Image: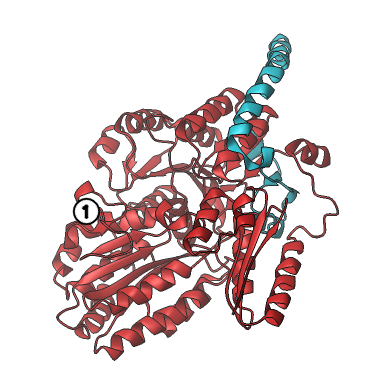
């Protein structure tokens, strides 16, 4: 069963990032929800953020490749 | 008068929260204007336009908050500032002691989370969605203004990982009977929906509910899913998912006309589906859909009607109005008999983009092409979105109206102003409106609209005219706003409230043509 199908058969457990009123709407429907107190990263400077993302990708990718390889062996 | 612009460093709040605070502050006695906004480049430009951009505000970053107030005197100003500060510190999530700052820390609080709802500004949306997908979480991405290339990247990953990637620009979904974003309280049932249109999904699901049936799952794909670039990835995955879902007996697909090649691709998958699929590419080529072996519906109400009949094992009947013809013609005649000769045009003011588009599709064969900011044919594009010309339908949820302010389903300011503007035009015969209820939408849309509609009707009357106002309400009696109450409030000020957007468009055509389209409609 894929994670997608799994979602349809499971109780929703939601993390909300952004508009806070969605939290109330979900709670009213009995959904467990955690709200993230999000704010624009890099002081909201999109150009700096692009550079940060590039850096992060560089750092991240060997790990991701590794975890993919591990997953494919299982 | 005292005017003050204050910058609160490192104070971020989302646009909906800030709109609510701005509205509350504007209502304070002695305060003539209030704006509580993030210091984004767009918002700073707005302040500059009204000459309120101080040096300090200009230097502020998108992480800083700007409070701009115009008050009668210093004392009122002081109390207004402290009220805004109080509202800013009163969080919706007040009972949670410490809020996590990132997805990672949220996951520590909820390790078994299975869905992330993201509604941050478009520039930051992909970043957050990507993090969620990489953590193996399904995503509902409400944010708009995300480039299609980024959408494609996200959807490719979600497909590989077997995750849902609803959006960007996904207004609504119903997963396991839970409404995400803007959506209505509908019964659980056996009809599955995959929709590239938020209000389209809302209209079809509420009409299914009204017919006594229900929704198994309603998956939103976001408005660009069926574009040439994105290639219908989420709609195709959605069809496959609902095909395997035991609770789903029949499937409805909803979208504005897709990119032709992508439309074909989607139809190919749909035609191989073991369950019946009703396809509603609003105003799209019916023959193409039928040739693909699917059931075609031209408009949203037809999609609901046909899929209900399929599930019930009945033959779908053609319906123009669900109210008897005699009653319809009587209502239309009463309205049109009060119009003056000069009053010739329909002015549609919509909060739902798809509802606006569907209206254009319905009106074109009845009264000819209608001008719009989202016209069926490029020749009919409005030169100025703020000035109607002949028959006009405006999608007030589109970008030109929403930069720097929330969606018209929440913030009625512009629509109310436009209703009055249309009423003052001696050529306006009918003002046509959609009212959308449900989670996410305004708590009481009728209460917002009624004073402006009454004012518009009075303005017309004072100039010796009668203004006809026709509306449809998309919602259910179970919605937080209660469909019946909303309908009653509108009817009290003389609004003709119809059971669907399509029927509202048709009766508006009957009124404006003084019944001349009766034969075209009823055959």
Seen in the picture, residue B200 relative to B281 is either above or below; the reply is: below
What residue is shown at x 20% (from left), y 57% (from top)?
Answer: B364
Q: Is residue B498 visible?
A: no
Seen in the picture, residue B423 relative to B8 is either above or below; the reply is: below
Q: Nearer the viewer, residue B173 or B148?
A: B148
Residue B497: % across, % down: 38, 74
Quadrant position of residue A25: bottom right
Residue B99: % across, % down: 80, 49
What residue is shown at x 72% (from left), y 63% (from top)?
Answer: B88
Residue B33: % across, % down: 56, 73
Q: Nearer the viewer, residue B210 or B351?
A: B351
Estimate how packed mark 1 is, as few (under 14), some (14 to 19) or many (20 or more) residues with alpha carbons within 10 Å: some
* Identity of the residue furthest to the front in this view: B55
Q: Is residue B263 visible?
A: yes
- Secondary structure, mark 1, is helix
Q: Which chain is cyan?
A: A
What residue is shown at x 33% (from left), y 60% (from top)?
Answer: B394
Quadrant position of residue B229: top left
Q: Which chain is red?
A: B
B93 lies left or right of A54:
right
What residue is shown at x 42% (from left), y 58% (from top)?
Answer: B401
Give the residue pinned by disc 1.
B380
| Image quarter (top left, top right, bottom left or bottom right) of the C terminus of chain B | bottom left
| Image quarter (top left, top right, bottom left or bottom right) of the N terminus of chain B | bottom right
Q: Nearer the viewer, residue B464 or B244?
A: B464
* Identity of the residue furthest to the right in this view: B97
Residue B371: % across, % down: 24, 58
Name the subunit of mark 1.
B
């Amino acid at each position: 069963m894929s994670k997608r199908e799994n979602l349809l058969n499971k109780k929703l457990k939601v993390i909300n990032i952004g508009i806070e009123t969605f939290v109330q709407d979900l709670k009213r429907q009995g959904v467990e929800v955690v709200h993230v107190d999000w704010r624009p990263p890099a002081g909201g400077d999109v150009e700096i953020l692009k550079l940060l993302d590039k850096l992060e990708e560089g750092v991240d990718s060997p790990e991701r490749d590794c975890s993919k390889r591990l997953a494919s062996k299982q | 008068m005292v005017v003050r612009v204050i910058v609160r460093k490192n104070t971020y709040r989302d646009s909906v929260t800030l709109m609510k605070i701005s509205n509350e502050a504007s209502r304070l006695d002695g305060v003539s204007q209030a704006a509580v906004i993030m210091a984004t480049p767009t918002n700073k430009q707005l302040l500059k336009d009204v000459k309120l951009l101080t040096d300090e505000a200009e230097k502020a970053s998108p992480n800083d908050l700007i409070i701009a107030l115009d008050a009668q005197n210093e004392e009122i100003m002081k109390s207004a500032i402290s009220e805004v500060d109080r509202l800013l510190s009163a969080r919706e999530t007040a009972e949670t002691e410490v809020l996590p700052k990132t997805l990672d820390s949220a996951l520590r609080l909820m390790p078994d989370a299975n869905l992330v709802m993201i509604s941050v500004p478009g520039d930051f949306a992909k970043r957050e969605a990507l993090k969620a997908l990489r953590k193996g979480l399904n995503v509902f991405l409400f944010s708009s203004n995300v480039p299609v290339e980024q959408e494609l990247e996200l959807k490719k990953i979600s497909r590989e990982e077997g995750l849902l990637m609803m959006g960007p620009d996904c207004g609504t979904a119903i997963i396991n009977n839970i409404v995400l974003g803007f959506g209505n309280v509908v019964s659980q049932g056996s009809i599955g929906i995959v929709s590239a249109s938020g209000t389209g999904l809302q209209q079809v699901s509420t009409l299914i509910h009204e017919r006594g049936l229900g929704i198994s799952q309603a998956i939103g794909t976001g408005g660009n899913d069926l574009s040439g670039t994105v290639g219908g990835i989420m709609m195709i995955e959605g069809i496959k998912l609902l095909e395997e879902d035991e609770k789903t007996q029949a499937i409805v697909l909803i979208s504005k006309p897709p990119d032709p090649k992508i439309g074909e691709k989607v139809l190919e998958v749909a035609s191989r589906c073991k369950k019946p699929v009703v396809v509603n590419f609003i105003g799209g080529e019916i023959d193409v859909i039928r040739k693909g072996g699917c059931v075609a519906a031209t408009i949203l109400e037809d999609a609901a009607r046909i899929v209900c009949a399929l599930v019930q094992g009945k033959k779908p009947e053609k319906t123009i109005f669900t109210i008897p013809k005699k009653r319809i013609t009587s209502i239309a005649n009463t309205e049109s008999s009060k119009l003056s000769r000069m009053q010739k045009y329909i002015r549609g003011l919509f909060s739902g983009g798809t509802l606006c588009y569907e209206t254009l599709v319905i009106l074109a064969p009845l009264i000819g092409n209608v001008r719009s900011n989202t016209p069926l044919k490029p020749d009919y594009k409005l030169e100025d979105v703020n000035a109607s010309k002949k028959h006009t339908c405006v999608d007030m949820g589109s970008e030109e109206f929403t930069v720097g302010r929330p969606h018209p389903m929440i913030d009625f300011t512009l629509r109310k102003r436009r209703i009055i503007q249309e009423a003052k035009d001696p050529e306006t015969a009918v003002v046509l409106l959609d009212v959308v209820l449900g989670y996410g939408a305004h708590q009481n849309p009728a209460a917002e609209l009624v004073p402006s509609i009454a004012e518009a009707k009075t303005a017309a009357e004072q100039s010796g005219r009668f203004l006809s106002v026709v509306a449809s309400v998309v919602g259910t009696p179970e919605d937080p706003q209660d469909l019946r109450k909303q309908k009653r409030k509108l009817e009290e000020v003389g609004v003709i409230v119809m059971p669907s957007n399509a029927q509202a468009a048709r009766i508006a055509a009957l009124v404006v043509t003084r019944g001349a389209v009766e034969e075209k409609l009823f055959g």
